[in-house]
Image (spheres, rainbow, N blue to C red):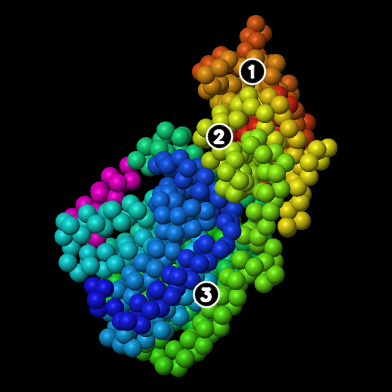
Amino acid sequence: MFQKLPKLFFFLLGSILILNLLQAYYTELIFDEAYYWYYAKNLDWGYFDHPPMVAWLIKASSFFFKDELGVRFMSCVFSAATLIILWLLIDHQKKKDYVLHFFVVAFSMTLLNAYGFFTLPDTPLLFFTALFLLVYKRFITSPSVLLSLVLGVVMAALMYSKYHAILVIVFVLLSNLKLITSKYAWLAVFVALLCYAPHFVWLYENDFVSIRYHLFERPNQAYSFNKFTLGYFVNLMAIFGLTFPFAYYILFKSRPQNTFNKALVYLTYGVLLFFFVSSFSKRVQTQWIIVISIPMVLIVFNYILENEKIRKWFFGLAIANIIILLYLRVGLIYEPFFPIVFESHGNKEWVDRLEYDVWDIPVVFENSYRNAPMYEFYSGRKAISLNNINYRQNQYSIDDAEASVQHNRVFYVTPYTRIAGFAYPRSNGQLFYGEYIEHFESFRRLKCIVEKDELEFDLNKTLVMKVYNPYKVTIPLHKLKFGLAYLNDYKEVRDVRKIVASPIDTTILALKSNDTVNFTFKLPKTKMENPGYFRLGISENNLPYGLNGNNIKLK
């Protein structure tokens, strides 16, 4: 297979691989990468925000290198492999005469370019989408038990990369409904589900926390045409850069000649239509539509091989795209070249300054699953995020991070409250404050349970909540204070109030391990006119209220 690849292909592929490796080595981590590096410290079958593939990728990278390249090495390898697979998916007889054009088409796509070295869930998603299409192409030509097994494993790998992968599978299926009657297709589905079973088990054991967050608990905001739908169309342009008019013109003009090309068109239009509809209810992030880059490389390249005029225009604009992207990539390393202060700028500096002050004292960041792993990565010191009622849950809410700093002296860092202790400026102008806590103790896993999912907004009605203690220790009630956050209809916190919660059994003075105590409380007054939801929180030892209860709908 590789013997058939042109020498120019190997040269250009090798050049891009070396460029990506150098970029990966010299560019500081961005916050999401640091967060996924934190995932990889404890391998599992799932994590709060995503399936585990990105963590597995980082763990594999760490076997080869340390520091930033120890996070990104496998992403560089996957990117190179993706280009090889895309080349193998092209059947056009003239493709060997246009090797340079192929690389220019692929390398000019903005996020396909960036994810050549960044390690994010979309990195394996792109690779396994290309691999899925390669296996699928052979499967529809000559289905067999072996290909069914391989296809099933690849589909599972897709889903282990990112939940959005289901769109890839569904839209390819819709392009070929005959698969519904194929025993080999059903075998592939069975294998995929079997391989994905460990993640289903993880979801069950963790109360489907990922699904609940993404589908029901994620904050939103009121619809804005400029931010939502217009923003979606801006993303459609951003993903192709200067070539976007020709890219979408080529897509519009494409007429699939066979089952496989039909799958490419269905996949592209399907993803675009799905997120267009989604843009009327939420903001669509650019990377959510990145998967169309894979079929679009094939659609665009095959089209320009047959259309010389379009080929010249597309090639010229793509070269301009690449020059801009290379300039920006230099700016990721050398800040003066970049138009804004980006995530990859200045992290080592603030980490060094903070570490200089606190040395080996664990650092507790208030509401920052981004800063905590960044500090831990560059300092090698322990850090966690302590999430409160104004924030959202994340991986630090469900793992043993809290237990690792219990009853220790810690340094507490917050951007919200001016503390007469230490101040840490960031390159983006943000200022953090810190102070020492001599004996840190928190109980963020206490659960406040209200039986009903919807309640009337009645300030005079006495309500009952159950407080469950999952810890192995008994917790005195005098250490706990109760609060409540009112949220708007889009689940954004707008008001936080304290409440008086009294145990129904007044003789109870402590929460025993793995036990539940019933409390009564009333909804407090609020400055909001019509709150949409409320959620309960517990303040332990005068810390900010935690995320101890689910969102309860108010009517």
Which of the labelled discs sits on residue 519, or is there none?
Answer: 1
> Which amino acid lies under the numbered mark 1 shown in the image of this protein?
Phe
The residue sitting at 51% across, 49% down in the picture is 36
When the figure is inspected, residue 267 is found, relative to residue 402, above or below; the finding is below
* Residue farthest top in this picture: 507
The residue sitting at 41% across, 35% down in the picture is 204
Disc 2, SS = loop
Instruction: Point out residue 467 in the picture as x, y percentages from the top left corner.
Output: 59, 21
Task: State the extent of the magenta-drawn residues as a range.
Answer: 179-197
- Circles 1 and 3: CB atoms closer than 8 Å: no
Question: Pointer 3: what residue?
Answer: 240
- Quarter of the image for residue 291 reads bottom left
When the figure is inspected, residue 459 is found, relative to residue 355, above or below; the finding is above
Instruction: Point out residue 285 in the picture as x, y percentages from the top left corner.
Output: 56, 60
Question: Pointer 2: what residue?
Answer: 401
- Within 10 Å of disc 2 (Cα), the crowding (few <14, some 14-19, many 20+) is some
> Which amino acid lies under the numbered mark 3 shown in the image of this protein?
Phe
Instruction: Point out residue 375 in the picture as x, y percentages from the top left corner.
Output: 62, 46
- Circles 2 and 1: CB atoms closer than 8 Å: no
